[in-house]
Image (tube, rainbow, N blue to C red):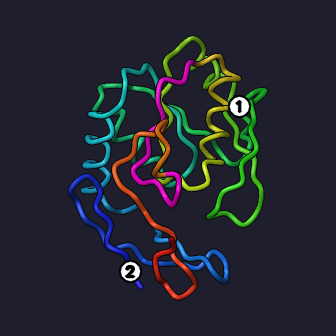
């Protein structure tokens, strides 16, 4: 089963996937879709406040943040990783529970990334906001780094997240029951 979503005037058919017996989501995958990545980056930048640096988490939103940085004329952006790397020094961490990941995770940014955010206006970027848990983890990292969060942006918001007034989004994804019918 598929769901057609409108992303600021550009449409895509998204395949539905079970995440529980009575819950399916429409999977939005930026990988391999240059057209929608460029379009979403342009539209999010047009709606976003002024910022100095952007922050996202690995991995599906990496093409988006790269394209946003390129279009905005920024040379740097920060990606929180799901594993600690040797080059991070003493990393900052945050816990995250995501609807699309089966277990609780930690995300990490290195000392250099934290220093890049200190005293800067930070725009947090994600591909899809659902429960908001990934977003909270990114906010934690930005705050621990001494950054000032000036905005939060996502291509799509799932379920009730669409009604949040603190996130810039380009489209809504409903949630689906086990048979593929839109919930609520």
Residue extending furthest toward the bottom: 179
Residue drawn at (59%, 79%) of the image? 18
Q: Quadrant of the N terminus?
A: bottom left
Rate crowding at label 1 as few (under 14), some (14 to 19) or many (20 or more) other CA atoms within 10 Å. some
**Part of the protein shown in magenta:** 148-161
Residue drawn at (43%, 63%) of the image? 173
Where does label 1 land, which residue? Answer: 88
Q: Is residue 149 magenta?
A: yes
Which mark is on residue 11? none
Residue drawn at (46%, 71%) of the image? 26
Task: Tell me the element at label 1.
Answer: helix
Task: Tell me the element at label 2.
Answer: strand
**Quarter assignment of residue 47:** top left
Q: Nearer the viewer, residue 156 or 54?
A: 156
Number of labels in the image equals 2
Residue extending furthest toward the top: 119
Residue extending furthest toward the front: 184
Q: Nearer the viewer, residue 73 or 99?
A: 99
Residue 122 in the figure: left or right of residue 14: right
Where does label 2 land, which residue? Answer: 2
Where is 114 relative to 56, above or below?
above
On the image, the x and y values in percent for residue 138 come to: 62, 37
Closest to the camera, between mark 2 and mark 1, is: 2
The chief SS type of the magenta part is strand
Q: Is residue 155 magenta?
A: yes
Whole-Å distance between the Cαs marked 2 and 1? 41 Å
């Amino acid at each position: 089963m598929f769901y057609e979503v409108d992303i600021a005037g550009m449409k895509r058919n998204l395949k539905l996937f079970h995440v529980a017996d009575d819950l399916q989501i429409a999977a939005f995958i930026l990988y391999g879709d240059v057209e929608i990545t460029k379009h979403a980056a342009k539209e999010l930048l047009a709606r976003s406040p002024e910022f100095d640096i952007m922050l996202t988490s690995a991995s599906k939103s990496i093409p988006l943040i790269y394209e946003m940085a390129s279009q905005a004329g920024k040379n740097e952006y920060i990606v929180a990783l799901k594993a600690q790397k040797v080059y991070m020094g003493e990393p900052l961490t945050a816990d995250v529970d995501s609807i699309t990941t089966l277990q609780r995770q930690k995300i990490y940014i290195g000392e250099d990334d934290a220093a890049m955010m200190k005293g800067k206006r930070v725009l947090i970027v994600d591909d899809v906001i659902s429960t908001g848990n990934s977003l909270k983890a990114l906010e934690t990292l930005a705050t621990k780094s001494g950054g000032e969060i000036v905005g939060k942006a996502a291509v799509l918001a799932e379920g009730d997240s669409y009604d949040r007034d603190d996130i810039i989004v380009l489209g809504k994804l409903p949630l689906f029951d086990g048979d593929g019918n839109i919930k609520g």
